[in-house]
Image (cartoon, rainbow, N blue to C red):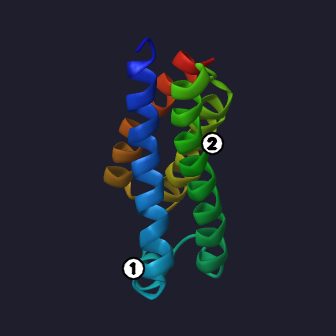
């Protein structure tokens, strides 16, 4: 298989975002209990559920595109869905980074930067 690194990156991103979306969907109340205080001193304080819903949408989109991208690479060597999966992963991570920086959670922001490097590698390899 010529695309092993690309597939591994796409699987990593798919697991990351599908699991995160799953947690938000099935543990919404718990997430709100953590996120509302986390953003209480930011401009997002009155918009946490809405912002989380937008993030959830992008996580699902990125995760699904990454899964379809893996299938596409395996079936016909195509890179379009994987590329867009990696791009939407980057966009999602930038949303998260913005939120963590806004909340002055620098450790959280640093963690997101690590994921971003992986996503950028995916964009590069699949472009």
Rendered position, 94 above or below 71: below
Q: Quadrant of residue 4?
A: top left
The residue that appears at 41% across and 60% down in the rendered structure is 19
Q: Evaluate whether residue 43 shows in this view.
A: no
Q: Under tag 2, what secondary structure?
A: helix
Residue under numbered circle 2: 88
Q: Residue 85: x, y in percent?
A: 60, 39
Task: Please identify, in this view, whether the residue under mark 1 or under mark 2 is nearer the observer.
Answer: 2
- The answer to which of 45 and 63 lies nearer the viewer is 63
Q: Is residue 50 left or right of residue 25?
A: right
Residue that lies at the very extreme toward the front in this rendered image: 75
Residue that lies at the very extreme toward the top in this rendered image: 2
Q: What is the number of the mark on residue 34?
A: 1
Rendered position, 97 above or below 19: above
Instruction: State which quarter of the image contains the C terminus.
Output: top right
Q: Tag 2 or tag 1, which sits nearer the N-term?
A: 1
| Residue density around tag 1, few if under 14, some if 14–19, many if 20 or more, within 10 Å | few
């Amino acid at each position: 298989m010529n695309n092993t690194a690309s597939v591994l990156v796409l699987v990593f991103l798919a697991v990351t975002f599908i699991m995160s979306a799953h947690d938000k969907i099935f543990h919404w109340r718990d997430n709100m209990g953590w996120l509302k205080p986390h953003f209480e001193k930011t401009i997002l304080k009155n918009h946490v559920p809405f912002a989380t819903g937008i993030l959830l949408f992008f996580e699902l989109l990125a995760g699904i595109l990454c899964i379809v991208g893996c299938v596409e690479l395996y079936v016909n060597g195509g890179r379009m869905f994987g590329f867009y999966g990696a791009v939407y992963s980057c966009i999602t991570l930038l949303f998260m980074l913005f939120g963590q920086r806004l909340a002055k959670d620098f450790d959280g922001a640093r963690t997101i930067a690590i994921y971003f490097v992986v996503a950028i590698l995916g964009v590069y390899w699949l472009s």
